[in-house]
Amino acid sequence: MNYRHVFHAGNFADILKHIVLARCIEHLKRKDKAFRIIDTHAGIGLYDLSSDQAQRTGEWRDGIGRITKEEFSADVAGLIAPFLNAVGAVNDNGVMTAYPGSPMVSRFLMRPQDRLSAIELHPKDSQALKARFAGDWQVRIIELDGWLALGAHVPPKEKRGLVLVDPPFEQPGEFDRMIDGVAKAVKRWRGGTYALWYPIKDRPAVEQFRRRLAEGGFGEGLDISLLIREPSASPPRLDGCGMAVINPPYTLAGDMATILPEIGRLLSEDGKARCAIQPF
């Protein structure tokens, strides 16, 4: 896919990813005991929607731009409120000028006893992330290949938590790296929740990824997908995305079954909700 995330910040893929992330965090907060979030491909944390890059694509307008203008049913509004509150915290007076990346969403939702390990390989991005969280003792920024982190940083000392794996898919073989990395992590920390974002563009690669998930012996899993259009003709486009969650909260399937129909219709190109929630 080969992109800098600022071009795509706040698009439909971010919406799905961050709603799932927020619902997982809210479930972890049901117990008083501390947890840790490990973000393996953290990015810069906050994206300027007025930048030339974001304005050039304008993808956020059909993503978070639509979400913040919609009046949802009471059930959906309640479930997505934590995510929308995190977005609102980086914007003034309801005017969309910025979009929080996953480290900022996580940090907004954490309690005083919880911790975040944000891992980013790109030196400039890592430095930007360190500057953003400077002085925040609940957040640790690590300049490291996120795939290595799956082996080196689990299990956390808290023994409870979530690993978010959201690679840029810039290089061939990212699906295989994801499966192989998570397989190592699960062996070290079987009780953790692993949330894996993936693009739906190369359909055969996606199906192979799903088969490997089902056959990997990772334990209980939930595959949540959202398509915004019918399959693209050549050349293939990003038609949708998914979140594969290993050891999902028991509430997640029900939460997303409530959220996705409304969100899917709003974010799709033709107003049709193309979404699925399937165990693996």
Image (cartoon, rainbow, N blue to C red):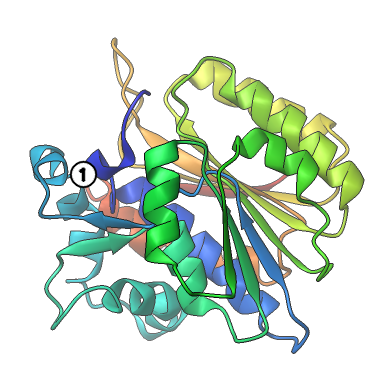
Q: Quadrant of residue 31?
A: bottom right
Q: Is residue 11 left or right of residue 25?
A: left
- Given residues 106 and 279, the one toward you in this image is 106
Location of the C terminus by quadrant is: top right
Res. 226 visible in picture: yes
Q: Where 128 falls versus 5 (above or below)?
A: below
**Tag 1: residue type?**
Asp
Q: Quadrant of residue 213?
A: top right
Number of residue marks: 1
- Given residues 252 and 163, the one toward you in this image is 163
Q: Is residue 159 left or right of residue 261?
A: right
Q: Residue at x 74, y 33 (%)?
A: 181
In percent of width and height, residue 16 lies at 43, 54
Q: Residue at x 16, y 45 (%)?
A: 54
In percent of width and height, residue 190 lies at 88, 53
Q: Residue at x 53, y 47 (%)?
A: 276
Dot 1 crowding, Cα within 10 Å, few <14, some 14–19, many 20+ = few
